Amino acid sequence: MARFSWYGFFAGMVCFFSWTAWGAPAPAKAKGKLIISDSQEIRSLQAETFKFLQQMKFGELEANARKFRRENKRFRDGSWMLAAFYKGLTTPTERLDESDGVRFMSLPDSAMVVSLLEKWALADPESATARIALGHAYIDMAWALRGDEAAVKVSAERWKPFEERLGLARRILFEAESLKSDDPSLYHALLRLGLAQGWKRPEFEVVYEKGAALAPQYDLIHLAKAIYLLPQWMGQGGDWQRFAHEVAQKRGDKDGAILYTRIAWGVALYLGGGERIFKEQNIPWSAMKKGFKCLMDEYPGSNLNMNWFCRFACLAGDAGEARLQMMKIGNRMELEVWGSFESFERWREWVSNRDDQR
């Protein structure tokens, strides 16, 4: 089995996944230039959420979850506050600034999170929110116990606790489902579980269809299925691409274009390098570009989306579009997108040296 994370994607999309009113940290500076990050509001909510968990303010957490579910609240980049809320519940604040390449937390981190969430679940037997978060946390702990080696290199001593924690996750998540929760993150967590346990396609599809019916716009549910359909998991070559195309077609023109781009974007980050989405996965840049343009029309205030649009244009070799987006970005680069100010400057230089204006 490969290493696995759902929250690395939200560092880019909720982050992505992505909160100013929540006390965002001051903008960073690089070489004397101000870097304004609209993802800071996301991390601020995550940090506030984890602080409430540490203080065992379970009532406040439950109220926030209800608000995010009821109002379908999103950030300025279009990412879901509910998804970021769950990331905050399962990620210690000091881990929020780590790179997207961190696939899962350390065992001590996971143990601390699990302990806090178990106290919440015990204190409130009717809380589906606590059980959904605990299910996510058990899955994170399972991967921390297993390690990130290829499956053939994992010892029996590590497979056993991995499977035990996944068993705990299954029990607590189906307990949450029995509480008649209308929370789409329940199905996101169950799909994570299905991937980790290697569910057969029919069982996985039942959960996916429930989640997609409950919250068709909740992107992580569709991304979960796309990951499941990768050849290194339970799919074959071309499966996830066909799925992304089909689900986007069902959504309709503008919304479908955005969903297609978000799925391809998430798979790109999951695979560890954006350029692989074009070189190895045969995703047409024209389709992703259309989705990014629709996304920018829908959420014109998002600096984060603009940076990702520019980044993928660079990786696709579209110097004309990258130049246009860089002009809009100015010095408002997003560190989580480019990695460093120096990397952003190298891409800016590449753009300025290109003659073609596709």
Image (cartoon, helix red, strand yellow):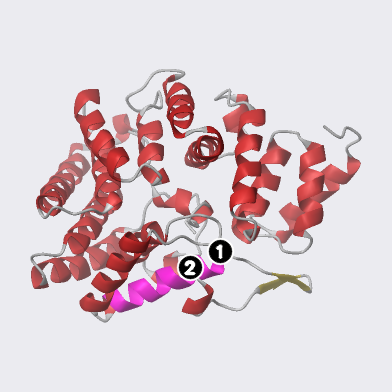
At x 23%, y 36%, the residue is 207
Give the image quarter of residue 225: top left
The reply to whether discs 1 and 2 touch (Cβ–Cβ < 8 Å) is yes
Task: Please give the label number shown on residue 39.
Answer: 1
Q: Is residue 262 magenta?
A: no
Q: Magenta region, mostly helix, strand or loop?
A: helix
At x 21%, y 59%, the residue is 134
19 or 30: nearer the eye?
A: 19
Q: Which residues are magenta?
A: 39-53
343 or 125: nearer the eye?
A: 125
Q: Amino acid at mark 2?
A: Arg
From the image, which quarter does the C terminus lie in? top right
x and y, in percent, of residue 34 in the image: 74, 72
In the image, residue 31 above or below residue 146: below
Question: Which type of secondary structure does the marked residue at label 2 adopt?
Answer: helix
Q: Residues within 10 Å of mark 2 (few under 14, many from 20)?
A: many
x and y, in percent, of residue 252 in the image: 49, 33
Question: Which type of secondary structure does the marked residue at label 1 adopt?
Answer: loop
Q: In whole angstroms, how far apart are the C-alphas of marks 1 and 2?
A: 7 Å
In the image, residue 18 above or below residue 31: above
